[in-house]
């Protein structure tokens, strides 16, 4: 089965992201707005229960909650026509990402970690140019806090569902 690890932001942040996603993101119905901490990886139920979940509990207990800000949009162009809310890089979010890619966790890092919340993807070149051109002129001042992360699993229809939630700081 396919699993992934993500942070779901507060409702306020999700509402901002969804105001764009419902129009520009074909994955809108498959998963709420999120920050991907670990890309999809394959694991079986036994591995999840005996190895991965205990490791995730340990990582969560040894990571303190932290805040982040988003002030503008950015894109992965020219690689893909994806537009996202750019999360201001912080030591805490990069440390958490590194912990989730230790030798005790399955899956490799395919890309450099760029903390973000996708708001548009799979746009045609023309639509991307129009949408990105107007969105990048907007200023955002969004503050949020990370106090938990979720282990997700993918359903047969492509949607993602929460398997377990891990609270930071051992709460």
Image (cartoon, rainbow, N blue to C red):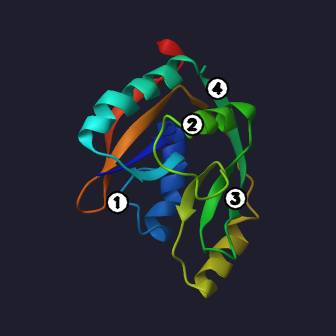
Give the percent coordinates (x, y) of residue 25: 47, 67
Q: Nearer the viewer, mark 3 or mark 4?
A: 4
In the image, residue 140 above or below residue 23: above
Tell which residue pokes out farthest to the front in this image: 103
Q: Residue at x 49, y 13 (%)?
A: 170
In the image, residue 58 above or below residue 109: above
Q: Earlier in the sequence, mark 2 or mark 4?
A: 4
Q: Nearer the viewer, mark 4 or mark 1?
A: 4
Q: Earlier in the sequence, mark 2 or mark 1?
A: 1
- Please name the residue that numbered disc 1 is placed on: 29
- Cα separation between marks 4 and 1: 28 Å
- Please name the residue that numbered disc 2 is placed on: 102
Number of numbered discs on residues = 4
Instruction: In this rendered view, identify the residue nearer to me: 52 or 30.
Output: 52
Callout 2: few (<14), some (14-19), or many (20+) C-alpha neighbours within 10 Å?
few
- The quadrant where residue 77 appears: bottom right
Query: SS at mark 3?
Result: strand
Q: Earlier in the sequence, mark 3 or mark 1?
A: 1
Query: SS at mark 2?
Result: loop
């Amino acid at each position: 089965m396919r699993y992934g690890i993500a942070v779901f932001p507060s409702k306020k942040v999700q509402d901002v992201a969804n105001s764009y996603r419902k129009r520009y993101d074909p994955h809108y119905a498959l998963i709420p707005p999120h920050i991907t901490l670990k890309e999809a990886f394959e694991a079986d139920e036994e591995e999840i229960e005996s190895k991965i979940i205990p490791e995730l509990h340990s990582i969560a207990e040894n990571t303190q909650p932290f805040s982040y800000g988003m002030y503008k949009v950015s894109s992965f162009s020219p690689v893909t026509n994806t537009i996202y809310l750019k999360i201001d890089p912080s030591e805490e979010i990069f440390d958490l990402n590194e912990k989730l890619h230790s030798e005790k966790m399955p899956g490799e890092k395919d890309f450099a970690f760029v903390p973000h919340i996708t708001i548009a993807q799979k746009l045609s070149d023309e639509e991307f140019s129009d949408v990105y051109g107007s969105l990048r002129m907007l200023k955002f001042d969004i503050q949020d806090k990370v106090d938990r992360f979720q282990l997700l699993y993918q359903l047969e229809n492509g949607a993602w569902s929460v398997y377990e939630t891990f609270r930071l700081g051992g709460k």
